[in-house]
Image (spheres, helix red, strand yellow):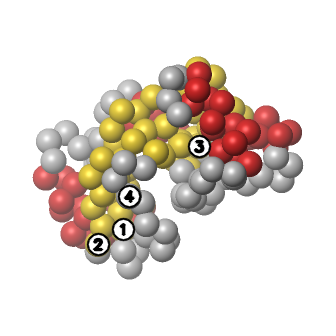
Amino acid sequence: MSIRPQFAFQIFRGIKKFELRRWIGVPVEEGSIVVVYVSGNVRAIMGEFKVGKVISGRPEDVWREVVRHPSPGVDHDDWPYIRGANRALALEVVDAVLYPRKVTLEELRRVIPGWMPPLSYKILREGDPVYELIIKPLRKLIGRS
């Protein structure tokens, strides 16, 4: 999942409890692991989080539900991202962790030439080169598999 630096760092500091997304037709399930690609001037895979509650629906409804939670880590800077979408998602951030080292876009492209980060998010499965060559070894370093 591509996330702007300011929001990614809020996730890793435990401030941001929900990540908002425009619906792109790919469901995200509770318990999924989200690998965080930090966009902007960082351009690197830096860590991951587990998805807790998934809220989906019209952007206005998703927004209302999220801001009811105590300290959701979501504010009016987040609203423009989902405003105007037909459908939106809010993913509860659970157990966010930084990898021992970031993997830069340049490094990713040395291993997987031409690799492009997703515009929003993408499902990685076993067998996917990014998962097998990059994520799986990083997850072993942090005791997750």
Which residue type does callout 4 highlight?
Answer: Glu
Q: Could you give the CA–CA distance between mark 4 and mark 1, rounded to whole angstroms?
A: 14 Å
Q: Is residue 118 visible?
A: yes
Where does the image place residue 143, in percent across and percent down from the top left? 51, 23
Kindly identify which numbered label has been placed on residue 37.
3
The residue at the far bottom in this view is: 86
Q: Amino acid at mark 3?
A: Tyr
Residue at the spot of label 1 = 88
Q: Is residue 121 above or below residue 32?
A: below
- Residue at the image point whose x is 14% and y is 42% from the top: 70
**Which residue corresponds to the image point at 36% horizontal and 33% vertical from the top-left?**
95
- CB atoms at circles 1 and 2 under 8 Å apart? yes
Tell me which numbered mark, 4 or 1, is placed earlier along the sequence.
4
Amino acid type at image mark 2 = Gly
- Mark 2 — residue? 57
| Residue identified by numbered label 4 | 29
Relative to 72, is 87 on the left or the right? right
The mark nearer the N terminus, 1 or 2, is 2
As measured in the structure, the alpha-carbon distance from the residue carrying label 2 to the one carrying label 4 is 14 Å
Residue at x-position 35% and y-position 63%:
89
SS class of the residue under badge 4?
loop
